[in-house]
Each structure stands twice: as C-alpha cells, then as structure tokens.
C-alpha cells in the first residue's frame, strides 16, 4: 500500500472517463485532488499518472492503426487494465467516481467500480446527471453512496471519523468505536466489543434488517437459475440409443 506521510487518512482513487473525456478528465481530478489533500486524503489521479508515463515512455496505443489491433489490445491489457486494477487492488482505500457521458462511452470506469465492489472498497459516486435513474441500477448498487453535488461529497468526506476508510488489523473499516456501513455509507458507533474478525460486507443496524428482509423474503435467484437449468437439461436430454450398430 502506497503511503504518503502528509496525507495519512487514506488513498482515494479517482475513477472516471478518460478516453472520451476532455483532456482525459484532468480538470475535475485536479480540483478534487486539491480538496482531498486539504482534508488529509491522498488522491490517486490516474490522469496525472497516465500523462507522466506518456511523457516518459510515449503513448501506448493512440497512434496505432486499426491494422495493429492485436498490438493495441496487448498494450491496453498490460499497461492499462492490469495497471489500473492493480492500483485499486493494492493501493486504494476508497474510490471517488464521476459518472458522466464519458463513462457511458467507455468501459474502464465500470470495470474499476466493479473491482472495488468485489474487494469491498467503498465507492463514492458523483452523479453529473442529478437524476438517479440516469445511473444504471447495477452501477448504483456497487456504490457506497451517491451524491449529486461535489460539495455534498466533500462535506461527507470531511465528516468521516479519522482513518475510517483504512482497514483495521481485522480487515474492517473502523475508527475507534465507529464502523463504516458498506451499503449506505453511514458511520455507526459500536458501544460494546469490537469486531475481532473481518466482517465483509459490514452493515449498520438499519441495513442489517434490510438485507435480512432481502434474503428471507425472496427466493435465492442464483439457486433458482441452477434449478431451472438443471430441469431444462433433464427434460431436453437425448435418450441414449440401445440399438446395436451392425457393420
């Protein structure tokens, strides 16, 4: 995990469109980085990192023609997909994502958010469209909290207990007696004993009841799919012929 001594509250990966964004999405990342640093967070600005790499080693795919598709794919797999995902896996405490048209036109941001979700890394989304239904339901569900305004996000970040975005020795996002709910982003205080093993996902009391209702009220969808496909396989099985073939 990368650690910056001047910004000890956690590393925040700035996810959003690049390929289809103006100046690779540099503008919002620069202003967001400044605000995060003022609060003690260390921003991981992928646009800044990409520009620095290109200045040092050249562009990896922009000038490759369609006839060089395989080389382009190879470069993107190694130096973009693998690199960016590793930065999230190994060096990120939370993700801030700007959801806008450049995200809709691309694919990397969606993959980054999914990777963070699978690793139980908080994802805080800025919805540039202001209307919730403009964000796909799957994308909504992989976030920890959604904001329509930058100032609301910054107020939320500033209100978090110090260090809560970083995992404790048990693997939970805790600061003192405070724990971060992975479903709603609310900070809940636990007055009795600490969790002494990893709780993943970790829910506040309200979300525990909500999730309990989800599990107990509805038939498990995956199990239904498996049973359905097994019945289908059984019904459509071709009987084995017992007729001997004479040569």
Image: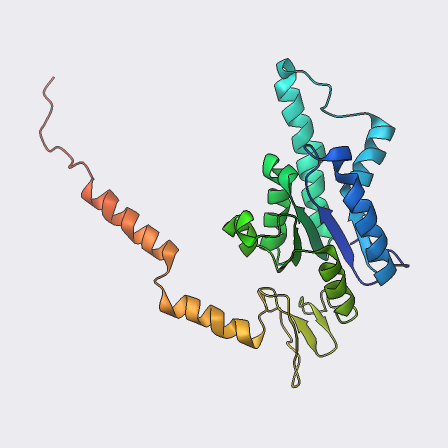
Q: Quadrant of residue 172?
A: bottom right
Instruction: Estimate the x, y position of residue 16 in percent, counting from the top left.
Output: 69, 43
Hey, which residue is sitting farthest bottom in the picture?
192
Residue 206: image location, x then y, percent: 54, 75
Residue toward you, 175 or 147: 147
The spot of residue 174 in percent (x, y) is 71, 71
Q: Residue furthest right?
A: 6
Which quarter of the image is occupied by the N terminus? Answer: bottom right
Above or below: residue 161 compared with residue 132: below
- Foreground residue among 245 and 97: 97
Is residue 38 or residue 81 the one in the foreground? 38
Quadrant that contains the C terminus: top left
Colour pattern: rainbow
Q: Residue at x 87, y 59 (%)?
A: 38
> What is the number of callouts on the image?
0
> Which residue is rendered at x = 11% and y = 23% of the image?
245
Horizontal side, residue 119 vs residue 49: left or right: left
Q: Quadrant of residue 187?
A: bottom right
Residue 24 against residue 95 in the figure, above or below: above
Which residue sits at x=72%, y=61%? 152
Q: From this view, report whether residue 176 is shown above or below residue 137.
A: below
- The answer to whether residue 166 of the structure is visible from this angle is no
Asked whether residue 98 is in view, the answer is yes
Q: Check the image and name the residue furthest to the front.
A: 130
Q: Is residue 125 left or right of residue 164?
A: left
Image vertical order of residue 190 relative to residue 180, above or below:
below
In the drawing, does residue 210 fall left or right of residue 107? Answer: left
Image spot of residue 171 (x, y percent)? 67, 66
């Amino acid at each position: 995990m990368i650690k910056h001594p001047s910004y000890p509250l956690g590393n925040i990966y700035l996810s959003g469109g690049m390929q289809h964004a103006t100046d690779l999405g540099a503008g919002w990342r620069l202003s967001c980085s400044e605000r995060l640093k003022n609060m003690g967070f260390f921003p991981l600005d992928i646009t800044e990192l990409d520009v620095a790499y290109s200045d040092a080693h050249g562009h990896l795919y922009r000038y490759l023609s369609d006839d060089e598709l395989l080389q382009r794919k190879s470069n993107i797999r190694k130096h973009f997909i693998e690199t960016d995902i590793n930065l999230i896996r190994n060096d990120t405490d939370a993700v801030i994502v700007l959801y806008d048209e450049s995200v809709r036109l691309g694919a990397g941001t969606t993959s980054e958010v999914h990777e963070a979700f699978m690793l139980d890394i908080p994802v805080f989304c800025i919805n540039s469209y202001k209307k919730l239904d403009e964000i796909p339901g799957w994308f909504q569900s992989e976030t920890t909290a959604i904001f329509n305004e930058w100032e609301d996000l910054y107020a939320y970040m500033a209100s978090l207990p110090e260090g809560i975005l970083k995992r404790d020795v048990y693997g939970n996002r805790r600061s003192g007696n405070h724990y971060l709910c992975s479903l709603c982003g609310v900070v809940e205080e636990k007055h009795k004993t600490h969790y002494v093993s990893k709780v993943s996902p970790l829910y506040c009391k309200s979300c525990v009841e909500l999730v309990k209702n989800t599990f107990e009220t509805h038939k498990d969808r995956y199990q239904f799919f498996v049973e359905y496909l097994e019945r289908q396989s059984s019904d459509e099985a071709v009987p084995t012929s017992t007729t001997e073939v004479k040569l």
